[in-house]
Image (cartoon, helix red, strand yellow):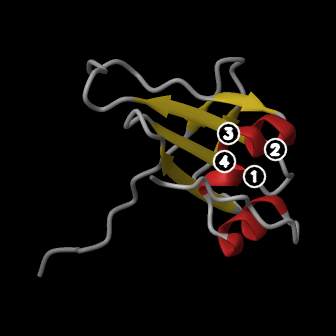
């Protein structure tokens, strides 16, 4: 019988060279109105790691990850997340202001 478990190790490396294992407090993905995907990883030490791509335009280049501030993470993600997801990511009771769709 084949072993169904694999021991793949995922390491995320930021632009400044800091490495993180595959264990995060929260991971959120949102898509904006231009079909760009924004991903944020929140570490257990409350650091925010950000990545961005457009799957319709990007070539097969390596993903870029960078550390961002909580304020920048809120600017990018807060109004695109549900209230529960915003609380999980930002430890806040602040309700996101949803954009009105016309």
In the rendered structure, the answer to whether residue 12 lies left or right of residue 8 reads right
- Secondary structure under tag 1 reads loop
Mark number displayed over residue 76: 3
The crowd level at tag 4 (other Cα within 10 Å; few <14, some 14-19, many 20+) is many
Label 4, on which residue? 77
- Secondary structure under tag 2 reads loop
> From mark 3 to mark 4, how far is it between C-alphas?
4 Å
Mark nearest the camera among 4 and 1 is: 4
The crowd level at tag 3 (other Cα within 10 Å; few <14, some 14-19, many 20+) is some
**In which quadrant of the rendered image does the N terminus lie?**
bottom left
> From mark 3 to mark 1, how far is it between C-alphas?
17 Å
Q: Position of residue 22 (x, y in %)?
A: 57, 53
Mark number displayed over residue 43: 1
Please report the residue visible at 28 percent of the width from the left and 21 percent of the height from the top.
57
In the rendered structure, the answer to whether residue 69 lies left or right of residue 61 reads right
Please report the residue visible at 63 percent of the width from the left and 35 percent of the height from the top.
50
Q: Earlier in the sequence, mark 4 or mark 1?
A: 1
Label 2, on which residue? 47
Give the answer, above or below, for where 41 lies relative to 98.
above
Q: Position of residue 4 (x, y in %)?
A: 24, 74
């Amino acid at each position: 019988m084949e072993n169904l478990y694999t021991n793949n190790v995922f390491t995320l490396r930021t632009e400044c060279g800091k490495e993180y294992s595959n264990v995060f407090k929260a991971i959120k993905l949102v898509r904006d109105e231009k079909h760009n995907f924004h991903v944020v990883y929140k570490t257990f030490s409350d650091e925010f790691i950000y990545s961005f791509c457009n799957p319709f335009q990007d070539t097969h280049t390596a993903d870029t990850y960078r550390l961002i501030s909580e304020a920048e993470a809120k600017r990018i993600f807060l109004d695109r997340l549900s209230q529960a997801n915003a609380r999980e990511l930002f430890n806040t009771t602040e309700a996101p202001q949803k954009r009105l769709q016309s």
